[in-house]
Image (spheres, rainbow, N blue to C red):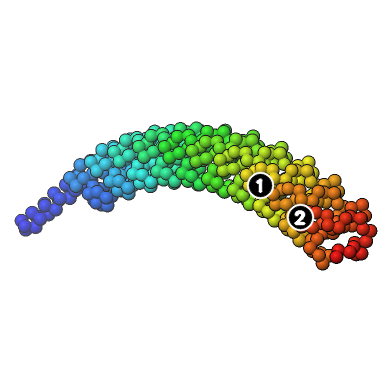
């Protein structure tokens, strides 16, 4: 009987001790279920932690407490009055409970955590220190713009911060493209509807002064086409202007059978070379491709007259003819020319071999003889391959000319 009484007394003591430890809490969670050896306790819709001795290690004052280690760090996220912060494994507040939202550490391409306060964003580090002020409207991930920096936005402007939290590109641009997308390691920037470039040190390599900038290397040369006030020019990979933006249009280098680029200004055409120099004055109404007339030259047109230029940009045939045919199409290496409704020939040196004085000239060899039939004032004769008249132009019927 005494033994039974003793056992009952011991059970009563244990029960009273347990009740004394849990007294005052609405609920007590299991120890060790929140990523730490403590137990989550609740009282009047507030949460805290007690340790295995029943001691309060985190005051019961939070609206919610997350598990330790779920935010990419050993801390636990706590919430109070719609604000959040962090506590560490000693129960100390390591990040003040003042933020509207806190992201996970390491999710923005860096070991920091993105924090939000009053619709502004910044970063904290793994010591709970503010490493980037909470002042930006948006912060992108590090490394998403072809560089290790993060794009930041503020008042509809953007810039970059580096992995030390320093502003490396001022927040003054309307838009910033990715590095390396324009055929060069730079990034295209836009400011007040004008475009320029910055380099990987954050330095301005091309001032934002152009209406448009093309990719480097797309015009048959390493330069980039720029547009300003509806005029075109070029810049090189040092950001220097190699061709002033003064042309209405610039073609690709090498598309006219020569390494030059065709330029247009005030409805006139010329050529520039790969040094940006004007090699053919911009004075022609039209310029054909080099090599399309049976010779390496290019046909040029000015005031309804035709001539030729060579691959040095020199005029080899004066621009004075109404029409010029292809070399070699009249049974001879020469080209037929027309001037004031009269025909003649020029050779491959641009020299006149037959003066343009005939009403018509046939092909050499077309009449069963090596000569060419010529007509002038309804009279006929023949010229030879030296351009000499071998049969006087005084015959009425070409079929009755005796060539023996």
Q: Quadrant of the C terminus?
A: bottom right
Where in the figure is residue 249, as x and y percent of width and height? 66, 42
In the displayed image of the protein, which residue is found farthest to the left?
Answer: 2
In the displayed image of the protein, which residue is found farthest to the front?
Answer: 404
Q: Which residue is mark 1?
A: 310
In the displayed image of the protein, which residue is found farthest to the bottom?
Answer: 368
Residue at disc 2, secondary structure:
loop
In the displayed image of the protein, which residue is found farthest to the right?
Answer: 396
Residue at disc 1, secondary structure:
loop
At 30% from the left and 46% from the top, the residue drawn is: 73
Where in the figure is residue 43, as x and y percent of width and height? 30, 42
Q: Nearer the viewer, residue 116 or 148?
A: 148
> Of label 1 and label 2, which has the lower sequence position?
1
How many residues crowd around disc 2 within 10 Å: few (fewer than 14), some, or many (20 or more)?
few
What mark, if any, has residue 386 been given in the picture? 2
Q: Can you tell which of label 1 and label 2 is closer to the viewer?
A: 2
Where in the figure is residue 402, as x and y percent of width and height? 89, 64
How many residues crowd around disc 1 within 10 Å: few (fewer than 14), some, or many (20 or more)?
some
Q: Is residue 89 left or right of residue 339?
A: left
């Amino acid at each position: 009987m005494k033994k039974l009484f003793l056992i009952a007394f011991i059970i009563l003591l244990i029960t009273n001790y347990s009740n004394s430890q849990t007294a005052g809490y609405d609920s007590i969670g299991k120890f060790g279920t929140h990523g730490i050896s403590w137990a989550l306790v609740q009282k009047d819709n507030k949460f805290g932690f007690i340790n295995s001795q029943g001691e309060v290690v985190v005051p019961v004052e939070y609206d919610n407490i997350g598990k330790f280690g779920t935010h990419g760090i050993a801390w636990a996220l706590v919430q109070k009055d719609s604000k959040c912060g962090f506590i560490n494994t000693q129960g100390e507040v390591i990040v003040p409970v003042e933020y509207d939202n806190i992201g996970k550490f390491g999710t923005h391409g860096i070991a920091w955590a993105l924090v939000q306060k009053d619709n502004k964003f910044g970063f904290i580090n793994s010591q709970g220190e503010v490493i980037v002020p909470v002042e930006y409207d948006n912060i992108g991930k590090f490394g998403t713009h072809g560089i290790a920096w993060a794009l930041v936005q503020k008042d509809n402007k953007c810039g970059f911060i580096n992995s030390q939290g320093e502003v490396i590109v001022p927040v003054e641009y309307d838009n910033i493209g990715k590095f390396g997308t324009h055929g060069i390691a730079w990034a295209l920037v836009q400011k007040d509807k004008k475009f320029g470039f910055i380099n990987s040190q954050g330095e301005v390599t091309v001032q934002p002064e152009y209406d448009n900038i093309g990719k480097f290397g797309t015009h048959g040369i390493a330069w980039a086409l720029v547009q300003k006030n509806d005029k075109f020019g070029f810049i090189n990979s040092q950001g220097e202007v190699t061709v002033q933006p003064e042309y209405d249009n610039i073609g690709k280098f090498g598309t006219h059978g020569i390494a030059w680029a065709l330029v247009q200004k005030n409805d006139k055409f010329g050529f520039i070379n790969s040094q940006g120099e004007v090699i053919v004055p911009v004075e022609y109404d039209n310029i054909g491709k080099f090599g399309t007339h049976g010779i390496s030259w290019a046909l040029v047109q000015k005031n309804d007259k035709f001539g030729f230029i060579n691959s040095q940009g020199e005029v080899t045939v004066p621009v004075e003819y109404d029409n010029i045919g292809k070399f070699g199409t009249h049974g001879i290496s020469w080209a037929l020319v027309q001037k004031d409704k009269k025909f003649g020939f020029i050779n491959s040196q641009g020299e006149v071999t037959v003066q343009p004085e005939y009403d018509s000239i046939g092909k050499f060899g077309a009449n069963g003889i090596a000569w060419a039939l010529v007509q002038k004032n309804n009279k006929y004769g023949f010229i030879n391959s030296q351009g000499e008249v071998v049969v006087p132009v005084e015959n009425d019927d070409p079929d009755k000319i005796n060539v023996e």
